[in-house]
Amino acid sequence: MSAPVSDPQRDGELVTATRALLARPWRTVEADPELVALVRRHADALDAWFTQELNYRLVVTADTARLVKTGHVPPDRPLRTVSATPRAFTSAEYAALALVLAATTSGPDRTSLRDLVNAVHSAAAEAGIVLDTDAASRRALVTALRWLIAQGMLRELDRGVAGYEHDADADALLEVRQDRMALLPTGAVIGAETPDELVERARERGSAATATRRRLVEDPVVLAADLDPARFAELRRRAADEARRIEARTGLVLEARAEGFAALDVDGGCSDVTFPAGGTVPHAALLLVSELVHQFRPEEDPDPIPWASVREVLDDLVAQHGRYWSKGALADRDRFAADVLSLLVSVRLVAVADDGAVRVLPPAARYAPDVTVAEGEAADEQPGLFED
C-alpha cells in the first residue's frame, strides 16, 4: 500500500490558520469571514496541534473562533482601547469590563443601556466594589463597552453607548451575545482570589517542554535568564528539533545565539507587534535603541542606563527628527517616552527596572548603527556588537 500523499493546500491552510490565531486569538465571522471558515474547516487538526504542542484550547462555534491561551502570561500585552490612537486599558477600564461580563451573565439577549448600567452597579455592589457615576467612571465603562462592541459581543441596535460618557441619563438599545461573552474569560479565573493567584493559575499549565515551546512561540526573544539553567540547557540541546516543529506549523524561524533564542517572523503575519514599522513611535523607538547601543555600548558595560540619560537621548532625537513626526504623538512628551519604551520592551530589545533604568538586551545589537571609520580615526570610535 502506498503512503498517503500530503495535501499541500491543506498544509498551507493549517499554517495560515495557526499563524492568524496566534497573532489574534479572537476571530468573528463579521470581521474575518474567510479565516473563520478556514478554522472551521480544519478545527480538529488545529485543536489537536494547539493542545499537544502548546497546551492551548481552541473553541470553534458557527461564527466565532477563540484560541484560549494559558500557561504564559506576557506582562506587556494589555487590551487596547478602540480609538484612532489605541492605548492600554487602565485598571478602571479592566474593572468595568469584568463588571459588564458579570452583569450580562444569564441576562436578556437585548437590553437597554440604562438597564445594563444598573446591572453593572449591582454586580459591583455584590463584589464589594464602590462604583461611582462621575465622568471618569462613565468613560471607563464606555471604553469597555466599545471594546466589547468591536469584538462582536455587543451590538448597538438603536443609538450608541458613546452618549453615556457625557450624559448619565443617555440610553441605547443593545444586543448581547452571551455565547461569545462566555468564551472571553479563561479557565484560570475560576477560584482565583487575588491577582497574583490568577497569574499563577494561568502559568501552571503543561510540561516543562511545552512551557518552553510556548515561550518560543509567544515571545520574540527568549534569553538564557528567562529560563532556569537546566531548562535552557535542555532547550539548547533540542534546538534543532524544536525549530523544525515550530517552523512546520507557524512559519517562525528559530535563531539560536549564545545569549538565547529568537523566533523570527519573516513576513510579520504571525506577530501582533511589528518592528521596525512605520509611524512616529516605531520610528522613534528604532532610532532610540540604535543610539543606546551606539552611545552606551552595553556589550562592554551591561549596567542599566539611568532613565535621565535615556530621556536625554530621546529628547535629542525629537529635536533632530520631531518636525517629521506626529504633533499629536509629541504633545505629551511623558506619554510619548512611555510609548516608545513600551514598544521596545514588547519586542524584547530593552528591559525597564522599577526605578526606570533601562537595560539594553542582546538582540538590540542587530540595530547598531553602521559606522564607517575614516582613515586616521581611532578604531575604538566604532560601536561594539554583542556576540553573534
Image (spheres, rainbow, N blue to C red):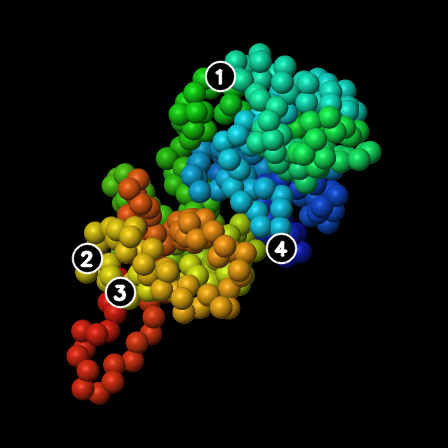
| Tag shown at residue 385 | none
Residue 257 on image: x %, y %: 31, 57
Q: Which residue is mark 2?
A: 301
Q: Nearer the viewer, residue 88 or 1?
A: 88
Q: Secondary structure at mark 3?
A: helix
Q: Which residue is mark 3?
A: 295
| Tag shown at residue 12 | 4
Distance between mark 3 and mark 4 Cα atoms: 45 Å
| 3 and 1 marks in contact (CB < 8 Å) | no
Q: Which amino acid type is shown beneath numbered disc 3?
A: Gln
| 2 and 3 marks in contact (CB < 8 Å) | no
Q: Secondary structure at mark 2?
A: loop
From where the camera sits, is residue 242 visible? no
Q: Which residue is mark 1?
A: 191
Quadrant for the C terminus, please.
bottom left
- The first of marks 3 and 1 along the sequence is 1
Distance between mark 1 and mark 2 Cα atoms: 46 Å
Position above or below: 12 against 370: above
- The first of marks 3 and 4 along the sequence is 4
Residue 45 on image: x %, y %: 61, 41
Residue 43 on image: x %, y %: 66, 39
- The first of marks 2 and 3 along the sequence is 3
Q: Residue at x 51, y 68 (%)?
A: 324
Q: Secondary structure at mark 4?
A: helix
Apparent side of residue 168 relative to residue 230 in the rendered image (left or right): right
Q: Residue at x 66, y 34 (%)?
A: 165
Q: Which amino acid type is shown beneath numbered disc 2?
A: Asp
Q: Secondary structure at mark 1?
A: loop
